Amino acid sequence: MAPHTSPRHKWTENEINFLKENYKHGPRYCSVHLSLPVSKIYSKAKKLKLKIEERLIKPQCHIWTNDKIDFLKTNYNYGTKYCAEQLQFTREQVRAKAATLKLHVSKEVKCKNSGRPRPYQCHVNADFFINPTTKEAAYILGILWADGSLYNAKTNLNKIAISLVSVDMNIIKSIFDKSGAWTIFCGKPLNRQPQTTLSCSNKTLYKFLSDNDYEIKSQTTACKILNNISDELKNYFFRGYFDGDGCFYCNAKSHLTQMSCSGSYEQDWTFVTKLLTNIDVKHVIKRRIQFQRGQYNKSSVVRCTNRNDIRKFGNYIYGENYDEMGLKRKYNKFMQIVSMIKD
């Protein structure tokens, strides 16, 4: 019998760029954020001739901050492996701290680790999204299209996750709570703002999102998922999407205004252009390749600069009576643009 080998992973441009920027923090850090085995991280880093900056990762190895202790207390029931991956500690370090705190793993998790059958549990209601009848469901589907990720279907992890700066996640977490209990993890990447990640493992939800192109969303259009959402709720999908990948820009001194949605170079913008055309908003699509720091960065953007057209778009996603769902800072920027319009 031939020896078992893991499937070959096809590295995306975004994964390679992440590895180049973050391998200095160590392979375990990259493994957690890319949801790939450490062995594959080592192999790719070796080909790219990347090196670890020990000074950046050693001081953090044995530091148990209050946030990490709180995370361990909340999530230890999911097992030492899960906590070790999320906290970037070894399993031995997690077990030792758990023993000090007198924490225990549930029987269900022990059964899973031992290979014995256990009851299938879901903490997030998949039907909430499969049959979206609420504005919260439409909004979450939108922001997941912008910033969500699906991980490791082949290993049956079936993980759905979304990461935002903690300031923004704290505002919209209550929307996610409507669909069930998401696992929450807070961290502070080096030289960046604190980040919060919400995640869940749900086979049914994973399959639904995968069938609607969430695995390949950076190269395709969102028309499939929009067909599952009623016309009365589509504006909430676009509000969620815009909170993730959209931007209102306003410079009163220079009298410059702009509405834009950013994506990958290969992004199929049909779902955005179709909406803008339907509400009579003039727009352009720009695709750009820049050479920076020894590598090519590729991106694309849908842009609108006419203030009256920006008002049409904002009125569509926010409605006549703004209900404050989502990131209010973006709504405030939209209102600043509206205030510059001379009727």
Image (spheres, rainbow, N blue to C red):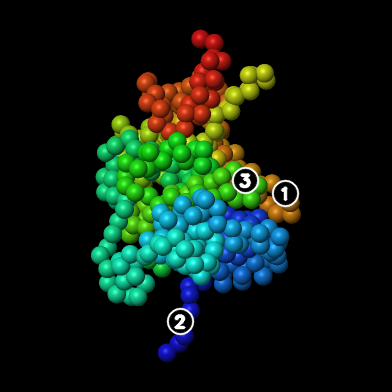
- Element under disc 3: loop
Camera-near label (3 vs 1) is: 3
Q: Nearer the viewer, residue 276 or 187?
A: 187
Q: Position of residue 203 (x, y in %)?
A: 33, 59
The residue at the far right in this view is: 294
Residue at 68 percent across and 58 percent down: it is 56
Q: Is residue 174 above or below residue 115?
A: above
Tell me the distance, in whole angstroms, between the alpha carbons under discs 3 and 1: 20 Å
Camera-near label (2 vs 1) is: 2
Q: How many marks?
A: 3
- Element under disc 2: loop
State yes or no: discs 3 and 1 in contact (Cβ < 8 Å).
no
Question: In the rendered structure, which disc, 2 or 3, sits on the residue that comes first in sequence?
Answer: 2
| Residue 89 position by quadrant | bottom right
Residue at 53 percent across and 46 percent down: it is 195
| Residue 215 position by quadrant | bottom left
Q: Is residue 183 above or below residue 82?
A: above
Q: Nearer the viewer, residue 261 or 89?
A: 89
Q: Position of residue 245 (x, y in %)?
A: 51, 40
Q: Position of residue 115 (x, y in %)?
A: 33, 75
Name the mark on residue 4.
2
Residue at 51 percent across and 9 percent down: it is 343
Residue at 54 percent across and 61 percent down: it is 88
Which residue in the structure is indicated by mark 1? 292
Horizontal side of 329 relative to 210 (left or right) equals right
Name the mark on residue 192.
3
Q: Nearer the viewer, residue 137 or 114?
A: 114
